[in-house]
Structures are given as C-alpha cells and as structure tokens.
Image: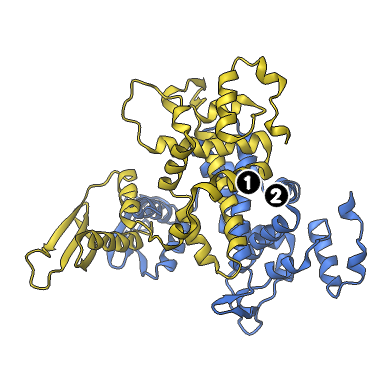
Chain colours: A yellow, B blue
Amino acid sequence: MTIFRKPLRVHFSPDKSLHESLRNILGFYPDNIALYKSAFRHSSAATLIKDGIKDSNERLEFLGDSVIGTVVADYLFKKFPFKDEGFLTKMRSKMVSRNQHNNIALKLGLNKLIDANKDRNSHPSSINGDAYEALIGAIYLDKGFDFAKNFMLTRIINVHIDMNEVETKEVDFKSKFIEWVQKEKKEFRFDIVNDGNAAADKQFLLNLIVDDKVIGTAQHFSKKRAEQLCAEHACAELGI
Amino acid sequence: MTIFRKPLRVHFSPDKSLHESLRNILGFYPDNIALYKSAFRHSSAATLIKDGIKDSNERLEFLGDSVIGTVVADYLFKKFPFKDEGFLTKMRSKMVSRNQHNNIALKLGLNKLIDANKDRNSHPSSINGDAYEALIGAIYLDKGFDFAKNFMLTRIINVHIDMNEVETKEVDFKSKFIEWVQKEKKEFRFDIVNDGNAAADKQFLLNLIVDDKVIGTAQHFSKKRAEQLCAEHACAELGI
C-alpha cells in the first residue's frame, strides 16, 4: 500500500499541486513527475529542445499507444480463451479506438491537466486521447509494465469500458473512412442515386465519391445505414 | 542465474527433448512447456478444441506481435532520445517487418521446432516469423513482460538486428504493395511505357496497374528502382 502514503518528496516539491491532482486521478503518487508533465504537454505549448525535436507528449504517446495495445491484447487473450485471433484483433481495435481513448481521457479528467496553447481555441478532441496514451507511456516508464497493466485493468478497463457494448458494437466505418480521408487530404461526398423518400421501394441508393471516383455503393432503407455500408466497401477497397 | 540450472521437472518430463532444445535456443528452461508447444504448432497441424477454435499458434501470435511492438517501442524511445515519433514509428515498422521476423526465426533455428502438416509442402516462409511472434507471446505468459523484454534485448535485438542497416534501409514498398495485393486478391502488373534499354534518355518509364487501373507511375534509370517508386506511389494512393 506504499503507493497511497504521501512521500516526503511531495511535501517539498514545487509541483506539489500536480502531484496531488495525479494522486486523485491515478490513485498513486508518481515517482518521476517530469514524465507526467511531458505527458500532458501538447505540441502547441512545447518548446524546441534540440533541432527539430520538441518537449511535447508525442514521443510518450508513441510508447503509450503500444503499451495500451499489449495490455488490451493480454486482457482479451485471457478473457476469451476460446475465441480466435480474428475476434481478438477486432475487439482490440474497438477497445483502443481514438474515440474510446478520448472518452477515457474525459472520464479520468485528464483534459483539466493538459498544457496547450490557450490562443488556439480549436484543438481537436483527440488532444485528450493523445494525452491519455502519453500518460500510459509515462506510467510505464515511471513504474514499469506490470504497474501500468494493473493500473489499466483496475482503473480503466474494469471501470470505464463496457465490454458488452464493445462486443456488440459494429465498427464505425464512416468515422474510420473520414479519418483516412482527412489524413490523406482528399475530397469526398455521398451522392444520392435514389432517394428513399421518393423511390418506390423506399430504399436509398448511395455512391461514395473520393476525388471524383466512385469508391463504394450501397442500398438500404436507412440513409445512415447506407452511408455506413458505402464506407465499409470503401475501407475494404482502400485497405484501410 | 536460476534460469540456467536444470529444474527437476525437466528430468521427468515427457517433453524432455523439447525442454533441452528450448534451453539451447533461448538460454533458459521454460516453466510451462505447453505454451511453447502451442507456439510452434502451425494451423495445418492443429486440432479443433472447440467449435471454430483450433489449438494452433495464432492466438499466441496475436499476443506476441503486440509484446514485440512494445519492447521495440521502448528500445527505440530510449536509444533515440532526440528523435521524433515519426522517426520512431518508421524505425519500428522496419524492425518488426514480416521479413525481419522470418529472418530472426531462421537465425534462432525455430524452423526446426515447428509442428506443421508434412503433406503440405508449400508453407509460406512467414510460417517461421509467425512462430517467432508466438514464441514471444509464450515467453510473456510464462515468465512475464520484463523477462520477455530482457530476452528480446539480449538474445535478439543486440545480436541479430543490425541497427545501422535498419536506419539506412529504405522501406521496401514493392513487397509491402504485393502483400496488400495478395491479401485483397487483386491482379497487378508493371507496364513498361518506355524501355530504358531502347529509349534515348536510357530511363525506364513504368506504370503499375491494379485491376486495369493505373495506380502508380515512375521513371528511373534502374528498372528495379522505377518499380519501387511506382509501388511507393501506389502505397500512398491506397493508404497502405
């Protein structure tokens, strides 16, 4: 239970309030507070420490993302002893999605700790998920893999992730596709070939167009569902 | 040094020879030999243990692949303190490539331990890399993360991976592209638009065609290099 006792160094630390905030959020006092400061430093608030390299949280995010993937792989491997690797892969991709990480960050209250340039009002919501990933990277470096794993199991997976929901939820292909389109800086639109409200069979027939090429087609009574199906085709086509 | 002493259970194990082989290859005696037997069992030699699920190495491969990714991320994070996450990501993808894993498996001699159906002569070479990934999954479950990490650092990364070569080596876009094409079951070919041997400027102009659509174009004095450049364009285009 040593992690709950307040270490002497916290009393005399110039970062005492950060120590206390982290104790409240994480359930333990950090050893190396500098790691956690980095984890919450968005690139907009970072300074150049050497040519081309900033003291932002992006390196920790790279590390933490990988640690999260392994902890989730281990968790799924043991939770589902009779499921094949296809199932495990699919479940993991849903558990470690950008959306999931943003939600976890907000539930933990990490958004209050993020150090970002206040002038930029329009940080994308992924700033929160990125900070969560970097935080796990910091915990891994500060306390080791087993500690980080235990933290994730007891404070995140068992508390903030509804496994039934994850298991039944369909992959959101439209979001996945839009993420790809934005990254690749391409134009896209859904073209309505048949309008379900007007058509005799009441079905929507949609084309998904990327850079003026049809990349997915689908038909459904629900326009939303037709969009999802178009995006699913597009993801398969583009190997996303 | 306990890992070098022969445990009593090895003397009386029906799998004594596998214990000894693993001791020679890995440098330690496994605790749970069943995990290692699974790690070397290719799906062609596996039996159904429950509807739809075989006792092959594919689940361990899923886990091991993730553990390898984290160990390599940690290694790169510490080895290159002044490189950004883009560099780290690129380096990792080269260190954990299919090709790299196949080579490591052969260097460790894992191919001699793989349990596969002898009738099938044409197992792809990735059968070796897959066994290596599954082996790391087995070590992780048997001995824990820190042990698996230490094993990878001392017995694989420091011994079998030439970091200078990894750093300078270009990504092999052609292999990456072909892997994608095969997975997606598509047809492709390189069309020679200008033959460098005949052309006045001695340059090869190639088109890369997928399902009868031009998806990449490149020009170079070397035909091989032109193919690589075509494939690089195609990878960018397809988001591979």
Q: Are circles 1 and 2 on residues that touch, CB within 8 Å? A: yes
The amino acid type, in three-letter code, at marker 2 is Phe
Q: Is residue A240 left or right of residue B54?
A: left
In the picture as drawn, the residue positioned furthest to the bottom comes out as B119
For residue A21, above or below residue A199: above
Q: Chain of mark 2?
A: B
A37 or B72, which is in the foreground? A37
The location of residue B204, given as percent across then percent down, is 36, 55
Identified at 30% across, 60% down, the residue is A234
Q: Which residue is mark 1?
A: A149
In percent of width and height, residue A36 lies at 57, 29
Question: In the drawing, does residue A129 fall left or right of residue A183?
Answer: right
Dots 1 and 2 on the same chain: no
Horizontally, residue B237 falls left or right of residue A64, namely: left
Q: Classify B200 as above or below B77.
A: below
Helix, strand or loop status at disc 1: helix
Q: Nearer the viewer, residue B44 or A138?
A: A138
How many numbered discs? 2
Query: Residue A7, labelled with which disc?
Result: none
Q: Spatial distance from mark 1 to mark 2, Cα to Cα?
A: 10 Å
Q: Position of residue A22 (x, y in %)?
A: 57, 29
Tell me the quarter of the picture where residue A165 sits.
bottom left
Question: Disc 2 designates what residue?
Answer: B145
Q: Chain of mark 1?
A: A
Residue at 23 percent across and 47 percent down: it is: A187
- Indicate the position of residue A233 as horizontal and vertical percent values: 30, 64
Residue type, numbered disc 1: Lys
Q: Assign a secondary structure to mark 2.
A: helix
| Residue at 61% across, 56% down | A74
Q: Decide which of A196, B92 is in the foreground and name it.
A: A196
Residue at 59%, 67% in the rendered image: B58
Q: Is residue A230 left or right of residue B204?
A: left
